[in-house]
Amino acid sequence: MDDDQLLRYSRQMMLPEIDAEGQQRLADSKVLLVGLGGLGSPVSMYLTSAGVGRLTLVDFDKVDLSNLQRQIVHATDDIDRLKIESAIKKLTALNPHTELRGIDHALKEEELYEQAQLADVIVDASDNFQTRFALNEVSVNTKTPLVSGAAIRFEGQVTVFNPTQTDSPCYRCLYNEDVTAGETCTANGVIAPLLGIIGSIQANETLKLIMNIGESLQGRLLLIDALHMEINEAILKKDSKCPVCN
């Protein structure tokens, strides 16, 4: 690392759990982030600012005025611009040391597997069950850890599925595929800071996985009620009858 990078990352390198070794692991890492909306915005910004080496961004939507209340990686002058273009502009200004790759179309199965195999961690910042189930399946089959988050109204949840660990459940252990249509922020609303809370936790879990520090949320589902500011935890068990991870 040059002097600019040493100064840029100095505050987190001061942490003994990270130090220069952890920062170098971040610099060498590759993350696949699917979704650049309310969750993907804070995830992308914190992973970039923390010094992740390569961040592959996947989103095919354009910025809409209604997005700006919560999708903080985009700005008013980005309306009608592809979210990929808007995010890369913002993230490049935030940290030019992170290599940013944009994919502005939905990934077909073969391409999704290819991108997952290139990544150290997959971050699910999508907003639909179809994408979540697809990411879970590719995570299990490629043995790539998956950091999952969701938020609606005042409620959010986040967890880690790590198929490199034999006792780790997967997303399919938590949700049955019969849940094909869920509530959406478009129909039900969401308070803006909640996305920042969940997205920040997703970013934190991703950094910990890369640097192999601390204790992850594997096997634990963090449930946040922002209206009453209550945080609860549910224990997730591997389903012995799961059609994906068993």
Image (cartoon, rainbow, N blue to C red):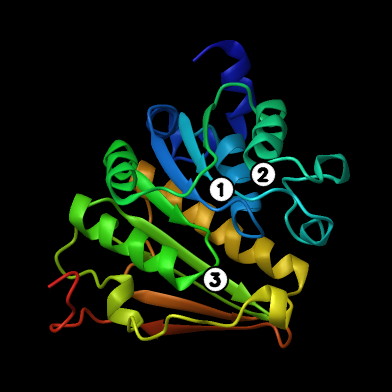
Element on which disc 1 rests:
loop
Q: Secondary structure at mark 2?
A: helix
Q: Is residue 137 above or below residue 119?
A: below
Q: The disc labelled 1 sits on which kind of residue? A: Asp
Asked whether residue 215 is in view, the answer is: no
Instruction: State the residue position of label 2.
Output: 83
In the image, what residue type sits under mark 3? Answer: Ala
Judging by the rendered image, the residue that carries numbered circle 3 is: 150
Residue at image position (58%, 50%) is: 43
Q: Nearer the viewer, residue 188 or 24?
A: 188
Q: Nearer the viewer, mark 3 or mark 1?
A: 1
Which residue is identified by label 1?
59
- x and y percentages locating residue 64 in the rendered image: 78, 54
Classed neighbour count for the residue bearing mark 1: other residues with Cα under 10 Å, few (<14), some (14–19), many (≥20)? many
Mark pair 3, 1: CA separation: 16 Å
* Disc 3 packing (10 Å; few <14; some 14–19; many ≥20): many
Q: Is residue 223 visible to the viewer in this orientation of the structure?
A: yes
